[in-house]
Image (cartoon, rainbow, N blue to C red):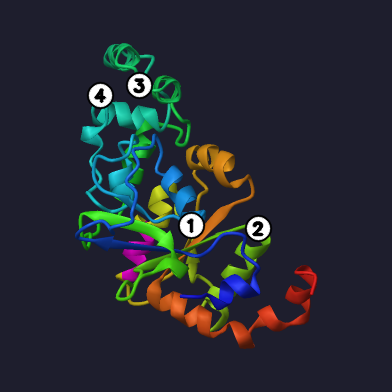
Amino acid sequence: MRSNIAQAMSLRFPPLAIFYTQEPPAKAKELRPLCSMLLVAQAAKGKTMALTQGTCGCPGAGEGFGLEPSCPEKFPGGRECFLRFLSIGNQDWDHGRAMIQKLTKSGTPKIMVEEFTEGEGFKKTPELVAQYLEEVPNIEPGGPYVVIKPMESLASGEEPEVVTFLVDPDQLSALVVLANYARPGIDNVRIPFCAGCASLALYPFYEAEQKNPRAVIGLTDISARYYLRKLLGKNILSFTVPLNLFKEIEGNVSESFLTRFAWKSMMGK
């Protein structure tokens, strides 16, 4: 499936199809990376990737891809350690220090131990993390596997549930305009505070269930960017849309600003 948007915006990476399946595609690769962003990067480079519960080193990947409900109790050390992990760290209480020693002795990667110890500092207090968790949506996955692959590689009968564009700031700006082009209102795009994987899957899948689904800007997660910048470069953000919105904006390319002076000039045309 070719994309009018990819052509009009001269995208560096192909649009990515993301969807659930009962079984992984025959050609799909199931890696066990420390962060699921490696799967995204591999898909951006043309490969078909698959993810299921327990196949990623990050304990939150299953939740971020909508494969299982949010459950901080499963985090190393339990819920309280997770609340501190996202905020102030676990080095200032006995249970936290015991878990730090356990993780260190078990061979947990150094970056994970450091972040567990110091905290990621993404929320000011554990209490704010707890409040944030109350707002995380739960969805019903359409299968035990999530597939990520270039749209141009979709096989006959395959259809994405959401589509992700990996874009630079200029292209992101254009997609925000395009998502609002044929719709009333000014809030047809959202930027949730969430993990990088959740911005590609959980929140877009949730939006797909809504009457008027919005596009989701993502990869604002600092941890995700830490991994992705080594794989795809620094100036990459994501713009993910449910399939019906993707079809809508694809159909509006030829009559929109993408064929007009300002955009053509920016593209050097």
Q: Nearer the viewer, mark 1 or mark 3?
A: 1
Question: In what quadrant of the picture does the C terminus appear?
Answer: bottom right
Query: Neighbour class for label 1 at 10 Å: few (<14), some, many (≥20)?
Result: some
Q: Nearer the viewer, residue 104 or 135?
A: 104
The part of the image, by quadrant, that contains residue 48 is: bottom left
Query: Neighbour class for label 3 at 10 Å: few (<14), some, many (≥20)?
Result: few
Residue that mark 4 sits on: 77
Q: Which residues are magenta?
A: 203-208
Residue 189 magenta-drawn?
Answer: no
Position of residue 54 relative to residue 140, above or below, is above
* Label 4 element class: loop
Residue that mark 1 sits on: 46
Residue that mark 3 sits on: 108
Q: Amino acid at mark 2?
A: Pro
Residue that mark 2 sits on: 169
Q: Nearer the viewer, residue 1 or 241?
A: 1
| Mark before the other along the chain sequence, 2 or 1 | 1
* Label 2 element class: helix
The part of the image, by quadrant, that contains residue 158 is: bottom left
The answer for how far apart the CA atoms under marks 2 and 4 are is 39 Å
* Image x and y of residue 2, in percent: 51, 75
Query: Neighbour class for label 2 at 10 Å: few (<14), some, many (≥20)?
Result: few
